[in-house]
Amino acid sequence: MQRNLEPLLRRYKGDSESVYNIWFINDDDRLKAFRLIRKGVQQVVDDIREGSFPNEFKGSSLEFVISCISEQKQVFAGASHPFYWKPKLRIPDIYENEANKHAFGEFLSRCLTSTNEEKLLNEIVRLDGLKIKGLGPAVANILYFLHPTIFPPFNTAIVNGFNRLFGEKRKLGSWSEYLVVRSVMLDVNRKYRNLLSSDLGAFAGLLFEIGANKLLIGNEHSLSAAEREKIEKVLIKRRKEVKADDEQGNLHSEMQSHLLKIGSALGYDVICASNDRSRCHAGTSLGALSLSEFPALPVHESTEKTIRLIDVLWFEKGKNHVAAAFEVEKSTTITSGMGRMIDLHHSLPDSTSSLYLVIPDKREKELQLLMQRQSVRAMRVGVDIHYLLFSDIRKHCDGMCMFGNSKDVLQKIAINIGDSHDEI
């Protein structure tokens, strides 16, 4: 990027009628909108989770959010159009399709609660991967009001301004196009931050002015072939990483789902880890298979928080006695799950818990070698832990549900990793 944008930026800021002055700097309604929109997005999330979100845009909590955005006409006029329900096209497909609706709700929930840029970008890649019809980067306008230093607004005028300024041919309706535009905007914004702002609304306003033909420019500030290639490589790498992470997460959720179903069929109260309740397998959330509330335990609050993170727990019916505990170790360090098991064992000494590590078949040798380490053997003194293989749980889930009478049925497929004095 060779061209110096400083003269253009000074002209943009010096124009008393520019978006920068009438909207970004001097519009109190812009600042008030951030809080209103955040509260509105939380209401959307709550409505979807509670099943009260309607099957059309009008009258929904989402309409309130988008109305707050589109009222700022200097930049966001027309922001509501992509969200109107178009019955002939069945788009955007978040009103009638329950799976898509819940996926959108969880996306918004994670974007509300996270401030980590990498995690937020991964959420966009995941949403894009669902290929929900009509749900494109118009959602970025919501993200801007949640994270204004991470996500720029996105509309036709901004894209047109971007293309004119940088000599590009980017399009409006694609998340991958949005991520390219965002990447360039962040790089340029960092270079000229002393003239702009950490809030990407200032730079977006410049592009809007150019795209709306309110600010004329000369020769384009072209991206080099190397710069384009670098951006594309980063986006491709991210998509691959998110896909791999989701595949691991799907297997993890599958095992949790099987264990919850088995425990429930055997007559136990079952619950998944508190941070996994929104995860789904075969169209059913893990939360729907779990107790609505975690049983009160006679342990310190900090210890209970650790126990709540165990992947699956079985409780004796109507009691707070842990009958069995399971840690699914798809790809994470096995010792971390083992540590939670040992904490559980020592925190509830009167409990007769059965403790299980649940691992992919390919990690069996890794587990056996780990158990031979002196430090691990010392850590497990007096703690009896078994392990279960993914393939056995998947194969025998239905049979255990149908013919099992208690947790003892697991002994048919469980493998004892031995106490600290035995060789593997």
Image (spheres, rainbow, N blue to C red):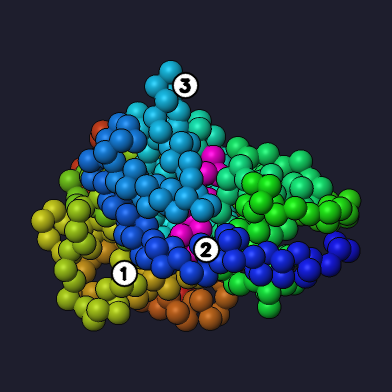
Quarter of the figure that contains the N terminus: bottom right
Marks 1 and 2 in Cβ contact (< 8 Å) = no
Q: Mark 3 or mark 2: which comes first in sequence?
A: 2
Decide: few, some or many residues near mark 2? Use Cα within 10 Å; few <14, some 14-19, many ≥20.
some
The answer to whether 143 appears left or right of 187 in the picture is left
Q: Would you name the residue on which mark 3 appears?
A: 89
Q: Is residue 140 magenta?
A: yes
Q: Which mark is residue 22?
A: 2
Q: Position of residue 336 (x, y in %)?
A: 47, 70
Q: Which residue reaches farthest top? A: 88
Q: Quadrant of residue 367?
A: bottom right
Q: Residue at x 46, y 60 (%)?
A: 145
Q: Quadrant of residue 294?
A: bottom left
- Disc 1 versus disc 2: distance between alpha carbons? 53 Å
- Along the line of sight, the residue nearer the viewer: 122 or 397: 122
Q: Mark 1 or mark 3: which comes first in sequence?
A: 3
Amino acid type at image mark 2: Ile
Q: Residue at x 37, y 65 (%)?
A: 32
Q: Mark 1 or mark 2: which comes first in sequence?
A: 2
Callout 1: SS: helix
Instruction: State which region is magenta.
Output: 136-147
Q: Residue at x 53, y 52 (%)?
A: 75
Quarter of the figure that contains the C terminus: bottom right
- Disc 3 versus disc 2: distance between alpha carbons? 37 Å
Above/below status of 42 relative to 14: above
Decide: few, some or many residues near mark 1? Use Cα within 10 Å; few <14, some 14-19, many ≥20.
many
